[in-house]
Structure formats: structure tokens, C-alpha cells
Amino acid sequence: ELTVGLHNQFRYTGFSREEATSVDAAGNIREINNRNDFNINRGRLVFSGYAFDEDLRFYSNIDYSTVTSNPIQLLLGWISFRMSDRLSIYLGLGKLPGTWEWTETSRYTLGADRTMATTFFRPSITAGIWAKGKLTDDISYHVLVGNGYNTLSLQASELDTQLAYSGLSWWEPLEEFGLGFSDLENHPSLAIRLGHGLTQTRNASSSNADPAAEQTVIRLSDGTRLIEPNAIAPGVTVNAFDIWLYSAHFGIKRRGFSFSSEVFLRWLRNIEGDTGTGLPSQFDQGFFVQSGVFVIPQTLELFARGSQVNGEYGSGDEISAGFNWYLFNKRSARFTFDVTSIDDSPAQQSRTGYVAGKSGTLFRSQLWTFF
């Protein structure tokens, strides 16, 4: 059996900056640009189904976009085998499941995209083996062992020899919480979700003692890349470190109202520089809170949210408000508009609109379709 699906996220992005430049912890001057453009932030051609037996399934997600360096690439892909109602095994390219908002598909975010705090803290995609299922009727889990924290586009020669370990578990003590963060299903009674996650890996240096390719996404709390020369100490470039990321989340839904929140704690330990000396550990923390309410059931939802990141090198935060319009009373077609006030963003990611060091007002309007 083969199913072909198409996701498309067409977005307008506008940004009005407060300052033309910012300076990072390494002393580099960063240019901050205004924005006024249309893009396909996420386009996905998805092939899924089963072969030989309904328990042997496959999934392949081909990504296309106008905002990344690779306009077409394999984003996710796996073979899975359902062992029982409690356990399914997956082998392939998948997400490290360390945080809730990251694990949920980007189609089901409350606003136009994931929050700034999630963008800063979350792990990414790697090749590995993982398991999903239920420990009991109301406790679910997702655990993975993979190549690293962020190895989507890396070849074997660019990987270190350290594996990444990540897991997420959650409890739904009342009725089923359902997909995403909006209460589109209009739960007649209270639904609660409570969970936590943990991700750990060692990022070793390359064979010539330079930073390895998979280390480039880790940033300090002012947005400076950890491996930027002089970021932590003058004349020193970080080339190895441990990551420990812990998250805890809580969500409720009832009669069109939703509330969700997630807390992040990250430790960077055993940091080594290219001079051979040890460097002080770093601890960063952050959170997001968001809430939505349907003013027209299963059609028009108003929402507000905020997130913050704090650490030794500074802090950044955002406050956002907007609306979701579900065109056919389904998740498969949604128009979203939001306005976000950003102060010293520590996060940077091409799809979300966040740029390290920027402050200003971000406007996003988009149409998500899936069929």
C-alpha cells in the first residue's frame, strides 16, 4: 500500500529591526536586516504505507524549500515494525525526541512556527534506531539512539564516534490529549498531558582537533555559536563538550480552550578548547507558555504566547499574538497570522524567522495545506 501526501507552508515574513547591528560574545559584529518577502518555508512530499505485512511500514519525507541551503533533501525516512500495541521499532532518519514542541510536527504549532525557546534548545535529526509505544494505557514513550545531536546532512566522515541518547515520555491521565496544541477537537471534558524528556551526547573534536561538523548549531544564550573563536575565552576555540538537555511539559484542552508550557534546562559540560585546557561549564534555562481559544468552534482560534532563554551570556525573550483560521474545520488547511515582539533573540534557524542577536517586530502570515 502506498499513500502520497503533500505538505506546503507558504509564508509572508516581515521584520522591522530596532538596531542595524549587534555584537556577539566573541566580539563579532552581526548585521541585522529588515525583511519583506514570500517563501515556501516547508514543502514536503511524503510517501508512506506498508509492504508484505501491515505491521511492516515505511515513511519517506522529501523536503523542498526556498529558505535553506539544500532546496531539496531527504528530511525524514524510516522502516518500522509494529511488535505489539506497546512497542514499534523504527530504523532510519528521525527526530531526537527530547522536547515536546519539537517532537510535534510543525503543522500543529499554535502559531506560525515553533517558539524561540524551542528553536534555541531543541535537538535535531539524526540516523538511528528508536522505539515508540505505550507503557500503560495512559503513559506513552519515545526513545532513540542515534549518530548525534544534529547530523541530518552529514556524511560518515564528518561524524564523531559518540552516539546521542534521547527520550520523551508523557502521561494523559484523563481522556486522550490528541494532536498538536490547539483544541480543534473541542474536548467535552478536561484533557491533560504531563511529560518530560532527556537528551545526552558527547560532541568530540575532529581528527585534527578542530570543532566537528555536528557542533555548529549549539549557541550561547546571546546567540553566539559555542565553537566561535573567542566565544568563551580569548584566543580559544571550543572543540569538544557534553550536552545534557532536560525538558518538562504540561498541557490542557477543554471545549476549545488550550494551554501548554514547556521548561528547558541545558548543561554544557566537560568543555575543551583547542589549547588543551578545560573551560567552565555552561548552564542555560528557558521556557515557553502559550494559550488559545476558539471564538468560532473548530474554525477561528485566537492565541497568545511567549518564550524566554536565560544564561550566563544574557537573555532573550518574545511575546506573540495572532489567530488561526481552519478553512474546512480540519487541520489539513490552516491560515495563520501572528505578530511577535523579539528582544535579543538567542536562536537562529532559517525556517522560523529567528536570527541570533536581533530585536524588533516579526510579522508572519501563512497558509498550511496538507492533502
Image: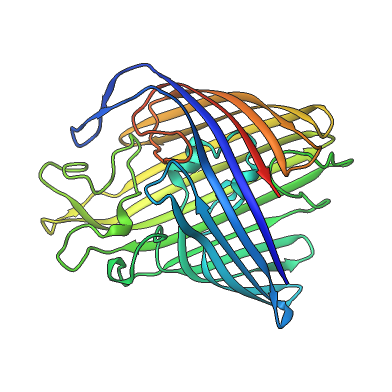
In the image shown, does 254 or 217 lie closer to the viewer? 217
Residue 16's place in the image compared with 91, above or below, is above
Callout count: 0
Q: Can you give x and y, in whole percent of width and height, for residue 206 in the image?
A: 21, 65
Residue 241, visible in the rendered structure = no
Residue 292's image quarter? top right
Residue 221's image quarter? top left
The quarter of the image holding the N terminus is: bottom right
Q: In this figure, which colouring scheme has been used for the structure?
A: rainbow
Residue 67's place in the image compared with 154, above or below, is above
In the image shown, does 6 or 119 lie closer to the viewer? 6
Q: Can you give x and y, in whole percent of width and height, for residue 170 in the image?
A: 67, 56
Residue 183, visible in the rendered structure = yes
Name the residue located 41 percent from the left edge and 59 percent from the top edge.
149
Is residue 232 found left or right of 340 in the rendered image?
left
In the image shown, does 191 or 125 lie closer to the viewer? 125
Is residue 124 found left or right of 234 in the rendered image?
right
Is residue 105 found left or right of 120 in the rendered image?
right
Q: Can you give x and y, in whole percent of width and height, for residue 131 in the image?
A: 61, 71
Name the residue located 76 percent from the left edge and 49 percent from the top edge.
177
Residue 145's place in the image compared with 123, above or below, is below
Q: Can you give x and y, in whole percent of width and height, for residue 145 in the image?
A: 48, 70
Instruction: Name the residue furthest right.
Output: 188
Name the residue located 40 percent from the left edge and 57 percent from the top edge.
150
Name the residue located 50 percent from the left edge and 42 percent from the top edge.
118
